[in-house]
Image (cartoon, helix red, strand yellow):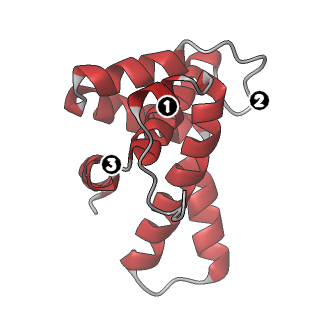
Amino acid sequence: MDNLFQMNFAKAQVDAISNLGLAHIGDGVFEVLVRSYLCAKGDQTVKTLHRDSVNMVKAPAQAKFAEKLLPLLTQEEFAYYRRGKNAHTHAAPKSASPKEYAMATGVETLFGALYLFGKTERLNALFQRVMEELYGL
């Protein structure tokens, strides 16, 4: 594991990680993609970048992201999404319904799995396609 920016786990390695473990890494991956997207949009203040990134990584926003994402997934990708969506989380934040939180966890789990597989091109393609639909990237 020489390059932590370019992972290349085998399926058995990814499958051995808990649902919430995959969501944990996927949360970070999603956040980096959102921050990169916002910075690429152009000149914004740090305050605006922070506010917009927080709004885009909240569970309700990730649930909307999931709705657009689901039709684009392969069967294997959908299985990782479902694995995260069905994970037994203890509580949803006040800003999200349990359904939104479950959908957000599904997105994070999928993004964690894709990252660990080293499928960064696929991650980027899915992210950009959904951002186009939601925000006009």
Q: Amino acid at mark 3?
A: Lys
At horizontal 57% and vertical 33% (from top left) the residue drawn is 22
Front: mark 3 or 1: 1
Q: Is residue 44 left or right of residue 96?
A: left
The nearer-to-camera label among 2 and 1 is: 1
Q: Is residue 17 left or right of residue 117?
A: right
At x 27% / y 55%, what residue is drawn? Answer: 121
Find disc 1 in the rendering and name its residue: 14
Residue 52, image x, y percentages: 56, 62
Label 2 element class: loop
Residue 91, quarter of picture: top right
Which badge, 3 or 2, comes first in the chain's sequence?
A: 2
Looking at the rendered structure, the secondary structure element under dot 3 is loop
Instruction: Quickly name the residue at label 3.
Output: 119
If the image is split into quadrants, where does the C terminus sit?
A: bottom left
- For the residues labelled 2 and 1, the Cα–Cα distance comes to 31 Å
Task: Specify the amino acid type for callout 1.
Answer: Val
Write the residue at 32% across / 48% down.
119
Mark 3 to mark 1: distance in Å?
13 Å
> Does 108 sit above or below residue 82?
below
Is label 1 in a helix, a strand or a loop?
A: helix
Looking at the rendered structure, the kind of residue marked 2 is Lys
Q: CA distance from mark 3 to mark 2?
A: 33 Å
Q: Residues within 10 Å of mark 2 (few under 14, many from 20)?
A: few
Disc 2 marks which residue? 94
